[in-house]
Amino acid sequence: MAATDKTPILKVEGLQTSFFTHDGEVKAVDGVDFEVGANETLGIVGESGSGKSITSLSIMQLVESPGKIKGGSINLTGEDLLKKSKSQFAKYRGNRVSMIFQEPMTSLNPVFTVGHQVSEALRIHKKLGKKDARQEAIRMLKLVGIPAPEDRAKRYPHELSGGMRQRVMIAIALSCDPELLIADEPTTALDVTIQAQILELIKNLQESSGMAVLIITHDLGVIAETADKVAVMYAGEVVEQADVKTLFKRPLHPYTKGLMNAIPRHDVDMDELEVIKGTVPSSAEMPSGCRFMKRCPYASEICETHPSLATPTHNYGVEDDSGAVRCWIYTEEWDTATKKQEVQ
Amino acid sequence: MYIFIIRRFLQLIPVIIGVTLVAFLIIQLIPGDAAQVMAGEAASEEQLEQMRENLGLNEPLYVQYGTFLADLVRLDLGQSVRTDQPVMELVAPRFWITLELAFWGLVVAVVVGLLGGILAATKQNSYRDLGTMMFAVIGLSMPNFWLGLMLMYLFSIELGWLPTSGWGDWQQIFLPAITMGTAGAAIIARMTRSAMLEVLGEDYVRTARAKGVKERLVIYKHALRNALIPVVTVIGLQFGYFLSGAVLTESVFSINGLGRLVVDAISQRDFPVVQGTVIVLALTFVLTNFIVDILYRVLNKRIEIN
Amino acid sequence: MGSTVNQKPAREEEIGAPESRWKSLFKKLIRNKSSLIGSCILIFFLLVAAFAPFLMTHDPNSTDLLNDFETPSSENWFGTDHNGRDIYSRIVYGTHLTLYVGTVSVAIGAAVGIVLGLFAGYYGRFVDTVIMRVADVLLAFPGILLALAIVSALGASLNNVIIALSIYNIPVFARIVRGSVLEVKSVEYIEAIRALGAKDGKIMFQHILPNVSSPVIVQASLQIATSILSAAGLSFLGVGVQPPTPEWGAMLNSGRSYMWDSPHLTLFPGIALVLVVLGFNLLGDGLRDALDPKSKK
């Protein structure tokens, strides 16, 4: 694993993004912290509705009305992006921070050629002329593994396959050599074989450029394959954060455990696939205590109080103890509470 | 593509024949003796017989229609029963005036409609949106001839800025063009708004924003290009409706186009002229729709997603 | 995932339970601002038409040449016309004519158009081809041109205007109904009924028709608006309802000669016309928003 730089490329602190609907405020992202260093990949994993996509859109400041970033800070190499004016931030978006999306089929504009769409960011940010931008676009297309890039550059998106289009999206995102790449479910819409290729491509490109990568997914398989660190999100909060190896070896939060059990495994003989019961609570029925409480098999009285993200009391046989978990089970309070019960 | 055009053209043939049949039937629909109606009460029996002879009214219906069609193919629309002039001679010069009028109406409709639709869509549910759409629905609800009269009163009579009537000078274009274009502008604005709203929610618009494209360019380049595809069809169809709108507008502003010709002909019971004008207007309408259909197909083909 | 789950009950609602559908439609209409405003305007004009005798301040047809071209005053609220008739009373009296022409011509046009559309969509093939070609021909006459041609031949009168506008409305409804029938025809429910041996007529009118009613209702409202405008246009051209009938279009036609000095002759009937048409257009828009499953948001 690559050595992590001291100052992280991206540092998100206390991020809050809400949607202000007719029925009141929906806190999609509610106090999220994490950081990603150069050459490092952070995976954010969670179900749909967990707030992981809104987190990524918040970083890009692409949250659409009625959504709004309410608080917190998003630091890119020490500069708070949320303090920038619209026009100041415009210089970052697509240049130093860029993003690829889930749906390669619909993420490219059908009326412009692929080459035009790749060169657009170059013309905006690198101020390249038409010809230079075109040359550079073709070079990017080649870099992301598109065969016959000169010819493909003249094509319209509908003439390309899904995998090719996602490669084009990557070419667009990386054209200005960003420090941070956000990939929101980059492979979900693709065939399994193509998925692996795209993930491999992102990894290779990261190695050569040293950019930080934030990968958003619901698929722990993708996390295992790409991420160095993982943040598990649930109902707008990070509920567990750990090194990827640690997380897979020793998932702590009952939700993480549930997610792990939801992956079909060939090495373990299981009678039945265990799936977490229930769904992410809506904002109206959001419990004031632990948000996972209603679905948690271990829920207890203490869970009525909202837990904070903290280092667990025990390290459960793992050397690295940099992880954190938002669950009462791994606190001293839990230990004393259960002891009390035993005494009674 | 060529197969599509040919197929579409073949579908056109029965419609064209139908149009001629309907136009032909106008005279047959006249209650009582058509010759009497056209010649007037005072006509003598000889004059009536002459009229019947000229119009071929004594022949069986299918012979009459056959002759009518045969003449039509030779671009002969018959003769006016009032002036004995060939209808074609009456129609041709006025056709260009009406076409020109429709063109300027379309210009107003497209410019105002597109701008209004974009303004509304880019700030959905704002007062700007609400106001624009309110204007649009009022514009749709306004009889264009009344709007014409009101504009004429305001700009010609009260303010004296523009001439009240006529056609030929550039100043004479404004009021009729606005009169004709308002309803079309309303329709185009509504269409543009909904198309823009749909497109603005598309993933590729988000991609453009993520690339760092300025919001103005996101709207006018990335979104509008796509939104225009359905709007173009509406615009094309509008042109046909302007041809009929011209009937009323020409009457208001005393413009000597096809519309006035047909209205005057009706009041003078000059049915061959009515028939000729109706055929020309309807066929122009059918042909514009045909062209728009093909254009839409061409536009769409290049970008068809599935 | 969520969307596919949600769509099912919507379909069932559409086909299965008519009462709850009307109730929910009513609720949606009340919440929809444009249909609410439109309904209010229309109710206002319906009341005006119904209570016209009580609302009129003068006899709409009594001329008073000593008091012609009066501008609006407390005596003549909207002024008097070239024959000294009270414009306000004439507009009030003419309300029922406008509503009558619009609704009757759409009712006739819709009735015929629905039947033809059902036949075309249900039987397909030859029946479809013939009916739709005829509809194409009628639709080839843009705007009021068809009505103008028909009225010019039949002669100018209220009834002939209604006949002409009815014919003009037929293909519009035939086309819409045919399209909806094609959509509904292949729904399992209809196929099941057919498999059970139900008669064609019963299937068409009892089972298919209710399911294609939404677009028809929306179109009817918008079409009334168009028909009123067309009728007024015909009167304005002098080929529709004839003076001295206080029809709004005819009033505009006679008023236009006096635009220079007395614009109020054309102002007030025009405003009345705009308001009624606006009412039907707003109602139609609101109905479309409420009934169209695509625009549920």
Image: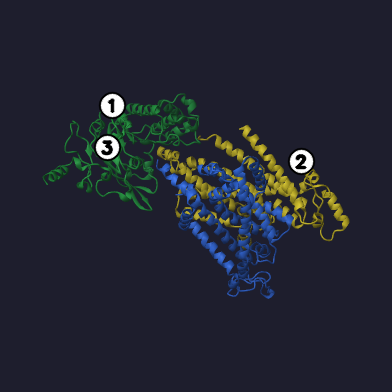
Chain colours: A green, B yellow, C blue
Type of amino acid under label 3: Thr
In which quadrant will I find the N terminus of chain C?
top left
Circles 1, 2 touching at the beta carbon (< 8 Å) = no
Type of amino acid under label 1: Asp
Q: Where in the figure is residue A205, as x and y percent of width and height? A: 35, 27
> Mark 1 highlights which residue?
A267
* Badge 2 element: helix
Circles 1, 3 touching at the beta carbon (< 8 Å) = no
- The residue closer to the viewer here, C130 or C101, is C130
Pinpoint the chain carrying mark 2. Answer: B
Q: Residue at x 65, y 55 (%)?
A: C165
Q: Which mark is residue A256?
A: 3
Q: CA distance from mark 1 to mark 3?
A: 19 Å
- The residue closer to the viewer here, A28 or B35, is B35
Pinpoint the chain carrying mark 3. Answer: A
Q: CA distance from mark 1 to mark 2?
A: 83 Å
Task: Say left or right for B94 vs A10.
Answer: right
Task: Say left or right for B189 vs B277.
Answer: left
Q: Which mark is residue B73?
A: 2
Specify few, some or many for label 1: CA neighbours under 10 Å numbering under 14, 14-19, or 20 or more: few
Which mark's residue is nearer the viewer, 1 or 3? 1
Q: Is residue A277 visible?
A: yes
* Badge 1 element: loop
Q: Residue at x 58, y 36 (%)?
A: B298
Q: Where in the figure is residue B248, as x and y percent of width and height? A: 66, 55
Residue at the outermost front position: C197
